């Protein structure tokens, strides 16, 4: 284990699914005290008994010393809380942080889609909340305690209200020290929206058509639906006052998909595993934002309805 070049922190990663597990692994390897909080009992038990097995892009190894628990109450009071849950669970995680965290603790939320900040605001003050965007970052869980790391391009970090602050610079340094390619950004909201366009283009369409990113874009009919979803989200972003960094949104999302043609969005993986997805934070939220501005989003509304209908069947089978 390398000696940390910055102050050793107590860090709670709430939601150690695929990406949360990678966050926890890197932070533990950097010498921080890491609590991995997740309701998946078998995963928690495996991490405690045998360590967290990581394979793939960042190398094959067993990361030991992570303290895995099923609820935040069982963890120490921490300096940093990283909320890496699905969007639908952000509110629950924020409620738990409100119960146990110090008033000066930092909270970093990294999710797909929109609305994480608003869900957190229902439970805790936004004064110490920062936002993160994982760009070109892929991972999957192959079994309890075993995570495959597919790729890691950039972790973008920013203040809710924008600007570069001392604490943002310190937080970015912590992630860099742990081995992440991390960068502080003055306008994180723009970056969230730009990733959101890619999520909207690929998530529900790949799930409904049961295909990879490359297969989606190779089919003229499927691609038309996907680009239709994107145009609706792009119109919402423009109405919200987002100044995108590109002039051609079709080229932007097409180039993004072309980088990972064999990949599947997490929503499709959820459906393959008969799990509930983050539809409400991705395609499902587009009609809500559209309605605020007098716009419509029929592509996203239709695909979201199909995804939710399938998930209703998952829930019935579980019962």
Image (tube, rainbow, N blue to C red):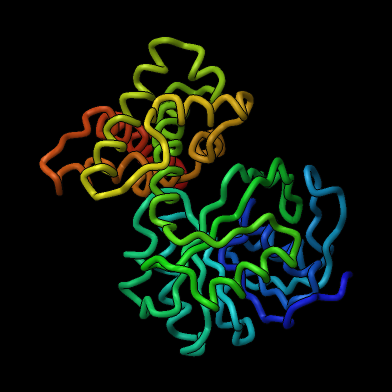
Residue 28 place in picture, x, y as percent: 76, 69
Can you say which quadrant of the picture contains the N terminus?
Answer: bottom right
In the picture shown, does residue 221 fall above or below 214? above
Judge left or right: residue 181 versus residue 282: right
Which residue lies at the image location 24% right of the left edge and 49% below the top edge?
A: 240
Residue 304 place in picture, x, y as percent: 31, 35
Judge left or right: residue 78 versus residue 68: left
Which residue lies at the image location 62% right of the left edge and 45% below the top edge?
A: 137
Q: Nearer the viewer, residue 66 or 10?
A: 10
Which residue lies at the image location 61% right of the left edge and 75% below the top edge?
A: 170
Residue 52 place in picture, x, y as percent: 78, 60
What is the tally of numbered marks visible in this picture?
0
Quadrant of the rendered image containing residue 300:
top left
Q: Nearer the viewer, residue 305 or 220?
A: 220
Residue 171 place in picture, x, y as percent: 60, 72
Quadrant of the rendered image containing residue 6:
bottom right
Q: Nearer the viewer, residue 222 or 177?
A: 177
In the picture shown, does residue 296 fall above or below 154? above
Which residue lies at the image location 68% right of the left edge and 71% below the top edge?
A: 174
């Amino acid at each position: 284990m390398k000696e940390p070049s910055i102050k050793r922190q107590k860090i709670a990663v709430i939601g150690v699914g695929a990406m949360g597990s990678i966050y926890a692994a890197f932070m533990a390897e950097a010498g921080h005290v890491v609590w991995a909080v997740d309701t998946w009992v078998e995963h928690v038990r495996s991490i405690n008994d045998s360590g967290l097995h990581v394979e793939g892009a960042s190398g094959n190894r067993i990361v030991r010393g992570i303290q895995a628990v099923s609820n935040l109450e069982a963890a120490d009071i921490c300096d940093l809380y990283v909320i890496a849950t699905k969007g639908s669970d952000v509110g629950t995680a924020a409620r738990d942080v409100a119960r146990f965290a110090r008033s000066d603790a930092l909270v970093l939320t990294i999710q797909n889609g929109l609305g994480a900040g608003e869900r957190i605001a229902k439970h805790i003050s936004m004064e110490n909340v920062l936002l993160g965007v994982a760009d070109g970052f892929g991972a999957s869980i192959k079994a309890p305690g075993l995570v495959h790391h597919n790729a890691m391009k950039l972790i973008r970090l920013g203040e809710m209200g924008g600007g570069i602050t001392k604490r943002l610079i310190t937080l970015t340094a912590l992630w860099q020290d742990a081995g992440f390619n991390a960068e502080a950004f003055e306008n994180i909201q723009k970056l969230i929206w730009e990733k959101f366009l890619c999520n909207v283009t690929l998530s529900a369409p790949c799930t409904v058509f049961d295909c990879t990113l490359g297969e989606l874009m190779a089919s003229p009919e499927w691609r038309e639906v996907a680009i239709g979803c994107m145009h609706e989200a792009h119109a919402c972003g423009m109405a919200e006052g987002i100044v995108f960094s590109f002039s051609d949104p079709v080229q932007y999302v097409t180039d993004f998909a072309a980088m990972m043609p064999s990949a599947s969005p997490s929503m499709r993986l959820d459906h393959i595993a008969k799990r509930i997805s983050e539809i409400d934070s991705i395609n499902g939220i587009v009609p809500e934002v559209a309605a605020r501005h007098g716009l419509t989003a029929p592509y996203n509304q239709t695909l979201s309805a199909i995804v939710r209908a399938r998930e209703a069947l998952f829930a019935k089978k579980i019962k």
